Amino acid sequence: MKQTFRALCVAVAMLAAGAPAAQAQQAAATSTAAFPYAIEQSQLPNGLKVVTVPYASPGLASVFLVVRAGSRDEVEAGKTGFAHFFEHVMFRGTDKYSKEQYDEVLKSLGASANANTSLDRTVYHMTGNARMLEKMFEVEADRFQNLKYSEHDFKTEAGAVKGEYTKNSASLYTQLNEKVSDAAFDQHTYEHTTMGFFKDVVDMPNQYEYSKVFFDRFYRPEYTTLLVVGDVKAADVNRLAQQYFSLWKRGSYVPNMKQEAEQTAPRYVHIQNANFPPMLSLSYKGPAFSDQSKDLPALDILMTMLFAENSDLYQQLVVKEQKVRFVGGSPNMTRDPHLTSIRASVVKAEDIPYVKQRIVQALEDAKTKPLDAKKLADTKSALKYGNLMDLDAPDNIANTLAQFIWLTGDVQSVNRYPALYDQVTAQDIQAAAKKYFVPEHLTVGTIGPKDTGGVQ
Amino acid sequence: MKQFFLRASLGLLLGAATIIAAPALAADVVELKQPNAAKVVVMLRFNNGSASDPKGKEGLAYLTSQLVTEGGTKELTAAQLKDLLYPMAARYGARTDKEVTTYTFEFHRDFIDKFYPVLKGLMLTPSFTQEDFARLKSNQLNYVEQVIRASSDEDYSKFALEDQLFRGTRYQHMTRGTAAGVRSITLDDVKQFYAKAYGKNNLTIGITGNYPESFVQKLKKDMDALPTASIKPEVPKLSPTKGVHVEIVSKPDALGSAVYAGFPIETTRGKDDFAALMVANSYLGEHRKSYGKLYDKIRTTRSMNYGDYSYIEWYEAGGNNMLPVPGVPRHANYASIWLRPVQIAEGLRKQYPTELGDLKVGHAPFALRLALREMDGLVKNGMTKENFELTRTFLRSYTKLYGLTPAKQLGFLLDSKFYGRKDWLSELDGQLAKLTLDDVNKAIKKYWQVQNMYVTVVTDDSEAQPLADVLKNNTPSPMSYAKVVREGLPKEVVAEDAQVASFKVNVTDVKVVDTKDTFK
């Protein structure tokens, strides 16, 4: 079981964003059980949503600000990576609290505070002393409304972002992830990772003026949800939200998203490296997240089933033949259609074509062969219990809720989406396999010692 | 906060956790009851780890623990076991560190009876098949030989530093071992190690969550069937080194220089002055916090990398964890400085061809000098009263986040036992409360210095030799800013840069090592 989680983690980390701070979009393993805690939601007249989940974590609370802007929203050429860069800039101070004073306040709060950016969102989070809630609101409301930084500070921060790119680039998985995204998408902004294209990262010091435009567009109440989980009362949270965020002005910007044209032939990318374990990744165009459609739950159940440690495929490739070190796969939960990816770390590069054939065969079988009813029920159970076990700390709970907030803008998706899993039938799964595992919609990524992956 | 609150409210609040230290029969038991929890977590902590690996079999403790958790039992093959567990989504695994190995089992309370036989079978009658052995050994060797060299240069630099700092001791090798060590391990070695290393006499049982008392009794009784462990980890006694010893690991296609530096210190969580050193360390370089001095000067002010921190004990997977994780307690300790990858000359030349086109060395020497100078400043001048108070306030609140989940709380309780304490996390608050500025400044003087240490840099092959030359000859290394940053620098920063550039590092030897020659 542990292997499954590890494989999944690797797949997830490689798939979407690409960095701990530019955190990966979570895979669609989120839930098939109703969320076990009460959710209280309200909205300020300016559009800011306020969500409170009281949870018995004596003396502690997590405060999250979820901004529905990520690298997806970087629609202009030359500005990739900007959502993530801006996340850094948000720590550069205001008139009331300079960078140093903001740090001092954070330090006095003794909180664990940070931020991360992904394809569809930027999340600012603090976990700490629940009795300091008002101070947390005050400093966060201040920087979200009154951020002010000098051109020098802006340029300086660009160096740290290049440093982050440098750190991440040491991983060949990160490098493959970049290439796969770039190859799989032509029109949609998912073609670049959250870190952005390297040329744009290098050019960031020159984008001071644009940064003000970016703040003006996206750091607005209608893009944001304030989420508090822990030892708090909704009445207090709502009162403080009103006190500190009600003067925040609504904006008007809506990005003009380009739809990706249908892919008509498989695509291939390869990294030549003789000193790294060979890797095969198969990425099919998948569905956008929806809390109304069964497509994503059906794919999630199918892929969990296909690659679990007790699956035929895993037992054959990993345990018996030992041609593969790990194999895993999952659809991504994203606002627009992204990739549903499978990854295998292959022992010998010459086996990559064989491993690909075996995986593709399993996907083909899923389109036609009848599904075992017990296996389906067991998989639903596995997903349900897996998720229930993770909800045991305020920050874990807030992270789970944040995901649904950025995907649909409505925290109640956390109840609607899992309910879909219960309705998924064997027929739904076959239909999803046929709809999404289309050979022409595939992008193949490989790492190996030769100048091609040998699967084209 | 949580830990303290729960202890203080013992018996008063329904649903609060209580810590019970049961009388020792065979294995010690540490309980943290959470009657409202959805799950149960069992931790079995054995006092053997990679420092117990026999000579020539480096990696054996790690491989053994993997084989226990990845295989089957006497009753069930691994495949049958995975079928049985699949709908439960139960999770289990092992963490092997230098001196301890911890098996952690997490399962939903609905499956307590169904899951337990698996736990018992894996621990008491693991199957140890040739098939599983071959697979897991191959994966481990692959990590040691390939993965570590091309996935995170930061982790690479840390393991390479331990290889240098603990050279000649049983702490030297990575927990996953060396290439030669892993290659030489046989299935028979694994079986023998299992029998010698995991005993009822070196086991602490930890349990938290929602479980009946009968479950604890059954677990205790069953684990009593474990044999008596006959080996112990070999804890190194390091004598202080003389001078600064640098090893530069040269690899192709690195974009930056990852730096890790450290020197042995003789304090751990077991000692009372550790809390004093925690305050100093938090001020100098709290992990992943922008208010550490190192972060402030190297990243925020000068934009040189992603972050810069200091440590007074091993920090597991620092690139992934914002807060420390339990399960890595150690008796042999060292202080360290972690500089995340800084730019190399090649990258800077490409980015700023007209301004920095003839640059020979990147930012590593300047960053290292700056970090050592900051530490040196603290050794010479100590902390101010104001910084002491603010940092202590921070820590008294922040350390309460270490045990955010019940499983983490339990892990820290097990670590407490290792250090001879009952509950280090809650005792820590009292220790911090009692501290004076004088205590902290004394601890700094007692444990920190910058004259004698080990430094490891993982960098690009184009950078390795020029970097070695600068460090060996103590050549001044002025900071090479891009014009866009240099133009707006405050005067104090420019003045400080001049001091840093020629700060003398007591380098006695510098060695360039090819990446192919690491962890052999």
Image: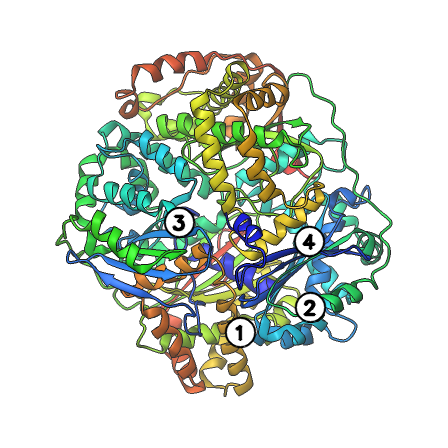
Going from N to C along the chain, the mark reached first, 3 or 1, is 3
Query: In the rendered view, does A82 fall on the left or right side of B98?
Result: left
Q: Which residue is mark 2?
A: B213
Q: Is residue A387 above or below residue A229?
A: below
Going from N to C along the chain, the mark reached first, 4 or 2, is 4
Q: Which residue is mark 3?
A: A130
Between the C-alphas of marks 4 and 1, the distance is 25 Å
Q: Position of residue B286 (x, y in %)?
A: 49, 34
Amino acid type, mark 4:
Thr
Numbered disc 1: secondary structure: helix
Q: Is residue B24 above or below residue B331?
A: below
**Residue drawn at (58%, 32%), measured in percent from left and top?**
B275
> Crowdedness of circle 2 by 10 Å Cα count: few (<14), some, many (20+)?
few
Amino acid type, mark 3:
Ala
Q: Position of residue B267 (x, y in %)?
A: 67, 30
Q: Position of residue B18 (x, y in %)?
A: 61, 57
Query: In the rendered view, does B53 fall on the left or right side of A221?
Result: right
Numbered disc 2: secondary structure: helix
In the figure, residue A31 lies in which quadrant?
bottom left
Q: Name the residue at the front extreme.
A: B12
Q: Name the residue at the left extreme.
A: A252
Amino acid type, mark 2:
Glu
> Contact, CB < 8 Å: mark 4 with mark 2?
no
| Closest to the observer, A330 or A415 | A415
